[in-house]
Amino acid sequence: MEIPFARSARSSVGIEWELALVDKDSGDLRQVAQTVLDAVRPPEGGEHPSIRQELLLNTVEVVSGVCRTVGEAGNDLERAIAEVRTVTDPLRVELMCAGTHPFAQWAHQKVTDKERYATLIDRTQWWGRQMLIYGVHVHVGIEDRDKVLPISRAMVTTFAHLQSLSASSPFWGGKDTGYASNRALMFQQLPTAGLGFQFERWEQLEAYVADMLHTGVIDQFDEVRWDIRPSPRFGTLEMRICDGASNITEVKALAALTHCLVEHYSTLLDEGKPLPTIPPWFAQENKWRSARYGMDAIIILDSSGEEGLVTDAVTQLLADLEPVAERLGCSAELDSVRVILRRGASYQRQRAAARRAGGELDAVVASLVAEMRAGRPL
């Protein structure tokens, strides 16, 4: 089968941000997504262009348009959030985001009434029902299909950088899991989720998708849920690595880092230079280390097995990418990654909030809600 790859502007960018709907008083999740979506539905009908439904009724997703800069995409998200708040504020519902809710119980959550979600739950059962998780997805436009897979393989080498910086799911069902990103390891339990195959030719991807369709594993390409995946209908490479971010500053920082990396690798291809790669077994280990240890992870840096502290690797990366950020108009957003390095990733701030409150996790929810309102780490 052939999978056409849509035309898109080089290094255009789009962001998707999944948000939890929480009760202003208890901090627990509220099943009011349909109320929100009905209220913001355009008069002519159909789906709101920037506010979307998700698997669970405690979640809405805000999405940017196809933008030239990360700043523009961030502005789109903020406008969508302001519109959501016109509905949620009177309901005494707050917006919150982290990779997981600190204490909500997955068994109490309701699934959105849509056939594709019912099919997913029917097939995946216990694991599917536990997908009480939130993420940030970043799309970056690729102007030439032949670049997609080489850039995808190169992005695997910086997977741990992005996962460690965004790690925000230390708690699950009221317990500290001991992981910085419990979401990362939970999500990969779904069929076709997790680290994808490092294909070298587009025909290999087409053959894989044909096999998955023929054997009934998937019904459409979007059901390939890899952490890094081509998005043929948009003409983008989609990075689904990051845990949900609690505030717009971090969303834009993570998006800028992603944006710069893709453009950097695209430029190397233009110059005829080789892109970095690592073997799948190193990639798997890096994913586990960054999920377990977050900002304290010692990661595998290259195909020869050299190792280093992830924060040192991020610091070096920021220096290397400064010229790219200037070219893409996201220098300020990329520099905000240093705010995460200074103040700690969300999982560290959440644990600190829990310690200050004597282990009470409603205080963690309150801190996440406050960060969402403030638009920055607190």
Image (spheres, rainbow, N blue to C red):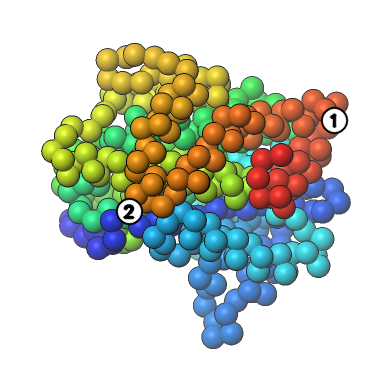
The residue under label 2 is: 11
Tag 1: amino acid:
Ala
Badge 1 or badge 2: first in the primary sequence: 2
Q: CA distance from mark 1 to mark 2?
A: 44 Å
Residue in the picture at 74% in, 28% down: 352
Figure quadrant of the N terminus = bottom left
Figure quadrant of the C terminus = top right
Q: Work out whether residue 185 can be spotted.
A: no
Residue in the picture at 57% in, 43% down: 250
The residue under label 1 is: 357
Q: Position of residue 44 (x, y in %)?
A: 54, 86
Q: Is residue 374 left or right of residue 237?
A: right
The quadrant holding residue 83 is: bottom right
Residue in the picture at 27% in, 40% down: 265
Q: Position of residue 8 (x, y in %)?
A: 28, 61
Q: Nearer the viewer, residue 182 or 207?
A: 182
Q: Is residue 80 left or right of residue 239?
A: right
Q: Residues within 10 Å of mark 1 (few under 14, many from 20)?
A: few
Q: Nearer the viewer, mark 1 or mark 2?
A: 2
Residue in the picture at 79% in, 35% down: 361
Looking at the image, residue 7 lies above or below residue 295: below
Q: Is residue 180 left or right of residue 273?
A: right
Tag 2: amino acid:
Ser
Q: Position of residue 304 (x, y in %)?
A: 27, 15
Q: Please tell me whether mark 1 sits on a helix, a strand or a loop.
A: loop
Q: Position of residue 160 (x, y in %)?
A: 44, 29
Looking at the image, residue 314 lies above or below residue 305: below
Looking at the image, residue 373 lies above or below residue 186: below
Q: Residues within 10 Å of mark 2 (few under 14, many from 20)?
A: many
